[in-house]
Amino acid sequence: MKRSTRQLIFLFSALPVAVLIFAIFYMLGMQYLEGRPRDFLASLEWAAETLTTTGYGVDAPWNHPIMVLFVVAVQFIGLFLVFLIFQIYMLPFFEEHFEARLATILPTPIGTKYVLVYHYGPNVSTLIDELYRHQRRVVILEEDPETVRRLKDQGLEAIYMRQPLNEFDFTHISHALAIIANGTDHDNAALLLIVQDNQFIGQFYALMENPLHREPLITWGAVAVYTPAHVLAAALASQASRNISPTIQGVQQLGERLGVAELRIHTDSPLAGLTIAQSNLRNSIGVVVLGYWHKGQFVPRPLANTPLMSGNIIVVVGRQEAITELNKLAIPLRRDGPIIIAGLGEVGQKINQMLHDAGEETITIDKIKRDGVDIVGNALDQTVLKQAGANTARTIILALSKDTEILFAITIVREFAPDVPLIARVQQPQTVTRLYRVGADFALSISQVAGQLLAQHLLGEAYISVEQDLKLAKVNTNGLIGQHPFRAKILENTGCQVVALERSGEIFVQFAEDFTVVEDDIIFLAGSPAAIEVYHAVFRTRKS
């Protein structure tokens, strides 16, 4: 029985009782207080007229104070009951009528197969965007009807799960290609067992909060189980310390040897003011500039005469050792001084632990006094920054809980310590652009981490999403054999740029005049998703 129907039955049952009680009290009041007795029917009529606010006939006014107060009270109760009808019945009725238009069952086997995402949130927003850009169908299963409506308004396909997880109808789940579980750890585990009972044979991935909960799901058949917060912490820690391996699979690394990095050109860098051609980074160091951030805007595929301006953040690809060498030129980091961590939540604690394990000195700031906090205070307070020695720190990592707070903190810290590298974690990927605009050196969201970890599995290709319209893809060289990588007119015909080539485990970024592509070579391309698809069509290659 629907909620509105149950409440309507209750309302219709309560109204006669209320009318009867008020009629009896009115009859007694008129006899003993007003001295004008009324029979039961007249009293019943009065109660109905009062509660429905329709007014009275000749049965007015009243003289006794208690009787007047009683009539006034019943009049207000009548108004209350009118509003109560809207609250108890009318609003739920319209809600249910609207909810009836929300999908409440999984897609039937008739139609395109899909990826099911259980529970929408920041962890999966980037992944969903990637799947849509690759024309994959995504269905989101959500418990909150307001979230379902919001997702539908955004053009996403969402299903309202009005029943508890163990009561929801997963009969058609076998039609799903894969499931991304983004609920609580115990709900993710329950979902895995439930869909297996309903003959689901696709790939199951889970995003967990506690790494200790990973093993049971792997044992039960999950393809992969990630803890995005910890992977994000590792990525940020590797940016702050050279003692931590920066090879974070799926986040900064394509294959075992080729990596992508974002580096700010500081004022005292020897690269500041040079054009890309003058810096000769491809031949001198072995990295290729894919694009750069300027005043919060990302510029892909820059021209050779583009200057490397102080304050710009360049996005480069190359061997890890080459990126490390470029890092020394772009950001001449001081090798002494502590690393300051502002915000000691889950991510901040993991960063602190990793840096300590790598032998780094850290100073932690948090508003709440807890284990591991060195300075209790607000990182937005310059007095606290001065106490922590922010202007002489090697690096400052901002792991605060709110994106708006991090934005403000970047502005304050950059003013207080203009030459100290600033690293930030954010919740929403769209905040990254704003952080670069106000002075962050490196920013990464948990959505980007989880999205790239999962997208490589689901899209069946090796690639890195550098920015929304720029991908780094790893493809085979069918159609290029016997040609020089730069003379095959790849850029002219497809819009893709050749950035590297892998042969027998060795990475080539520079190519001699007599260099030719041979069978089993792997080529790395930078371009938009559409341009990479054009490459596959023009050169009749298959994705690696």
Image: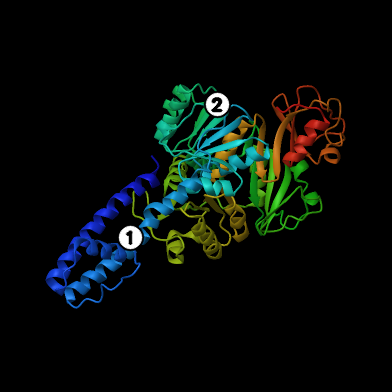
Q: Are marks 1 and 2 in contact (CB under 8 Å)?
A: no
Query: Taking 160 as reference, is 110 above or below it?
Result: above
Count of labels in the image: 2
In the image, farthest residue toward the bottom: 63
Residue 183 placement: quadrant: top left
Q: Viewer-proximal residue, 347 or 27?
A: 27
Instruction: Tell me residue 394's x, y (percent).
Output: 53, 53
Q: Is residue 402 visible?
A: yes
- Between tags 1 and 2, which lies in front? 1
Query: Taking 63 as reference, is 389 above or below it?
Result: above
Residue marked by disc 1: 81
Disc 2 secondary structure class? strand
Q: Viewer-proximal residue, 471 or 310?
A: 471
Disc 1 secondary structure class? helix
Q: Which mark is residue 63?
A: none
Instruction: Tell me residue 329's x, y (percent).
Output: 67, 50
Q: Quadrant of the C terminus?
A: top right
* Left or right of residue 467: residue 352: left
Q: Is residue 247 visible?
A: no
Q: Quadrant of the N terminus?
A: top left
Residue marked by disc 2: 203
Query: Taking 406 as reference, is 55 above or below it?
Result: below
Amino acid bearing label 2: Gln
Question: Neighbour class for label 1 at 10 Å: few (<14), some, many (≥20)?
Answer: some
In the image, farthest residue toward the left: 32
Residue at the image point whose x is 79% and y is 34% from the top = 535
Amino acid bearing label 1: Leu
Question: Neighbour class for label 2 at 10 Å: few (<14), some, many (≥20)?
Answer: some
Instruction: Tell me residue 209's x, y (percent).
Output: 43, 38
The image's colour scheme reads rainbow
Task: Pick whichever of labels 1 and 2 is earlier in the sequence.
Answer: 1
Instruction: Tell me residue 173's x, y (percent).
Output: 52, 27
